Image (cartoon, rainbow, N blue to C red):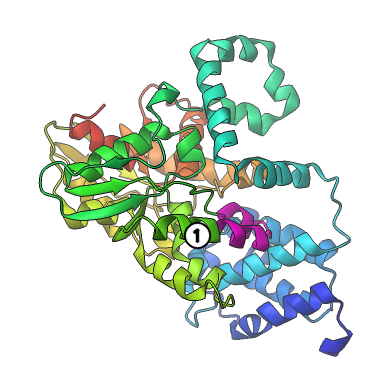
Amino acid sequence: MKKTSLNPVVKNLHDKTYNWTNQCVQCGYCLPVCPTYESMGKESASPRGRINLVKMAAEGKIDISEHMAEPIELCLGCRACEIACPVGVPYGHMLEAAKDAIAQSKQQKRENSHFLLKNMAMNQLFPYPNRMKFLGSTVWLYKKSKLDRLIRKTKLFPILSEPLAQMEKILPPLENPSKRLKHGTVFPAKGERKVRVAFFTGCIMDSIMYKVNRLSIELLTSVGCEVVIPNHQTCCGALHAHQGATEKAKELAKANIQSFTQSEAEFYVNNAGGCGAALSEYDYLLKGDEEWAETAGEFAKKSRDISQILTEYGPLPFIKEWKGIVVYQDSCHLRNVQKVYQEPRQLLQSIPGITYVEMEGANRCCASGGIYNLLHFQESMKILDKKMKEVIELQPKAVITTNPGCQLQMSLGIDRMEASENIRSMHLVEILAEACGLT
């Protein structure tokens, strides 16, 4: 079929992805590292199979909505296949282009419940920090008033949605919202000032897990960082890019770039692997934008995970021993996109008294995948339950992660294994803070 005969959505998909799909040599090195190929056992659930589907859709040989959409949407986007690929196929960028094409497809059923959930979350919630904070404060009140116990007795959540019922059970304890970081604040370094950094507060981290944000500032200042919380920062746009809302992702990226470049900071620090991956790829997201491309490149170069900064400017002032076995579950986007995997392990092993054990398959996705575990609950649980068997065998006191979605997913896994009395799911920042005597 001639390219000129393709409809605009297909032509756009062709222009963005066709050269990438032709890079794939069908070697299959990606198959053993793909969690959905392992759990579903079919070619269309593998990176190689999905690349083939995108290629055929770009050629107009198959329908985007009917044939390509489901296999693409069942991909976790963990990008482990990029690390295994010997010819460097940029699978993550191809996946986002395919999601964009799916979103644009006129044949998509927009009344689909998955579409409504995604649309509400991405367009009415995540881009609005005050709405996210209101949501977080409501959750705090919900748990503080013990209304959660009453609602559970009614079994209302399982009737509405089993995935939501599961997630509601593992929401972490929230501290008073008055302790949430205030944008525009500057926190001085404790002792000698070594560097000025700007902190990215995130959506979920700022609304639900703001204690981790507060502890992050305590750790950063303890190693000599002056920390500024830039005003007018917003959602990183990762979920939007991953769900095909590329233009909204660009809009959010520009807002963050504008906010952070005014901070006069040497580094832009985050504590969420998924957000950090998006921030570090703003240069790719805006590469065709004449006005923003150069600034986006500078922004991406300054983006750092908190583990990198704590390792570079440490050591941390530990004052307590942490007794017990801990295992670490990589955030896919921290490891596979940002290539950060040694620093979290180094920090854990530096805690006095700790017994760090490397978990088999720590680099394999936990199947949180942003909101994948809500949209594709059963598929997500198959992958999670397999991972939890590895965890339980090691009998750790804590599973450590570096991403809010991963942390909640591991909490859910621990709950499903009925091991909540013995194993905690913790952010890296939390365990470091405990050993530093911070509460």
Name the element at disc 1.
helix
Picture quarter with the C terminus: top left
Q: Could you tell me how many numbered marks the image carries? A: 1
Residue at 65 percent across and 63 percent down: it is 246
Q: Nearer the viewer, residue 116 or 237?
A: 237
Residue 63 in picture, x, y percent from top left? 85, 69
Residue at 60 percent across and 34 percent down: it is 131
Q: Nearer the viewer, residue 290 or 408?
A: 290
The main secondary structure of the magenta stretch is helix
Residue at 57 percent across and 48 percent down: it is 370
Q: Quadrant of residue 149?
A: top right
Q: Is residue 134 visible?
A: yes
Residue 181 in picture, x, y percent from top left? 39, 35
2 relative to 179 in the view: left or right: right
248 in the magenta segment = yes
Vertical order, 234 against 434 (above or below): below
Residue 172 in picture, x, y percent from top left? 46, 27
11 relative to 399 in the view: left or right: right
84 in the magenta segment = no
Q: Nearer the viewer, residue 254 or 327?
A: 254
Q: Quadrant of residue 64?
A: bottom right
Residue type, numbered disc 1: Ala
Residue positioned most to the bottom: 2
Vertical order, 172 against 401 (above or below): above
Residue 408 in picture, x, y percent from top left? 49, 36
State which region is magenta. Answer: 237-252
Picture quarter with the N terminus: bottom right
Which residue, given by chain and number where applicable, does mark 1 sit on?
278
